[in-house]
Amino acid sequence: MVKPQISGKAAPVSFRGVSKKFGKDVVAVDNIDLEVQAGKLVTLLGPSGCGKTTTLRMIAGLEIASSGKILIGDKDVTLLPATDRDVSMVFQSYALFPHMTVLENVAYGLGFSGFPKDEARERALAGLDLVGLSGYDNRLPSELSGGQQQRVAVARALVLEPQVLLFDEPLSNLDAKLRRQVREDIRAIQQDLGLTVVYVTHDQEEALAVSDEIVVMRNASIAQIGTPRQLYDAPVDRFVADFIGEANIIPCQIETRDGDTARIAIEGYRYDLPSRGLPVGPASMAVRPSRILLGVKNGFDATIAKATYVGIRMEYTLETAFGSMFAVQEDVYHPLQVGQAVKVGFAETGPVLIPGG
């Protein structure tokens, strides 16, 4: 028998004024509007307690919204139980049955969905092939690595051909090297099959690597939605700037504005950048560690407080008149020394003024 192809039936997801309360006083999600396009991978990103996992669980039907409306495709699923939604979820813990073989784990949901035993087996084999685990079907989960177990969990979700595939912190139990490999696998499968994926993580690098769009959440609400580059290059406020990748938040003075360009000053050092609608006066700017230049002729004063060699780069903690800064430099052969005075400037592009900052 020819193995069936696993295909996506990608559907959009829409949140319209959705809130979730636990008891009378705990607001886990507060009146959010969200549109997830069909065939896209959207990541819910934020610190613990921000509402991202509750939002994911409301898509799955594991939590029921207190108010508002949730649609999958054109279907209102707000009050439907999990069993009546065409979604699959990959959990942080993998949730594999230890006494079942890999093949039995992958085929488990297909049996409940009414597939004949032979077809369920063939679909499960196709799913294992898709995640690169052909030949592992008779092993037990305990005989697999953490990354392989995660792939089994992905295969089990994929064979159901859901309209929406959900991931809840899927890589948190893996080491750093394996996380990178598995996230690339997940992204490749999502793109190859055109799946709609909603992905929850608190890891900023992970979110930047896998997402078409990122939803940054804070205090039960949405702080900003955008592509990885939009969020990294143009954060809407101090929270997003600091949360999406590392950023130095630096006080400055907007001296003049010329159209959409502002000239800022930091202790006599002047730099031009987009004004983002901010007026002349005190302001704050976000500067990524890689966009800081050390040892320039024209800059502001700093002292090297800490220098750390991490193999591919040097990491420096700087002390300035307005506080500490963090910078990275690729030159590992001529490191700056602790206590050394340096002039600090910024790269031609990268620094950004922070509205409301």
Image: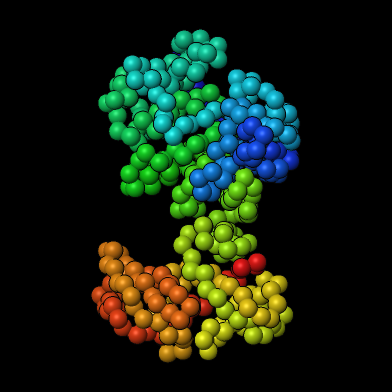
Q: How many marks?
A: 0
Q: Is residue 102 left or right of residue 311?
A: right
Query: Residue 167: x, y in percent?
Result: 50, 36
Q: Position of residue 39 (x, y in %)?
A: 60, 40
Q: In this rendering, is residue 335 above or below 221?
A: below
**Depth check, front residue: 102 or 170:** 170
Q: Which residue is depicted at the point 67% across and 34% down?
A: 24
User: Considering only vertical position in the picture, is 170 above or below 207?
Assistant: above
Which residue is located at x 57 percent, y 84 percent? 265
Quadrant in which the N terminus appears: top left
Q: Position of residue 349 (x, y in %)?
A: 53, 74
Q: Quadrant of the C terminus?
A: bottom right
- What is the quadrant of residue 302 in the picture? bottom left
Colouring scheme, one of rainbow, by chain, secondary structure, one colour: rainbow
Residue 209 visible to an observer of this rendering: no
* Residue appearing at x 49%, y 36% in the figure: 168
Say left or right for 327 vs 45.
Answer: left
> Do we see residue 22 in this rendering?
yes
Is residue 195 or residue 42 the one in the foreground?
42
Q: Position of residue 300 (x, y in %)?
A: 46, 85
The vertical placement of 329 against 132, above or below, is below
Q: Residue furthest front?
A: 25
55 or 131: nearer the eye? 55
Q: Which residue is painted at 34% across and 20% down in the image?
A: 98
- For this orientation, the residue located farthest to the left is 333
Q: Quadrant of residue 129?
A: top left
Front residue of 219 and 346: 219
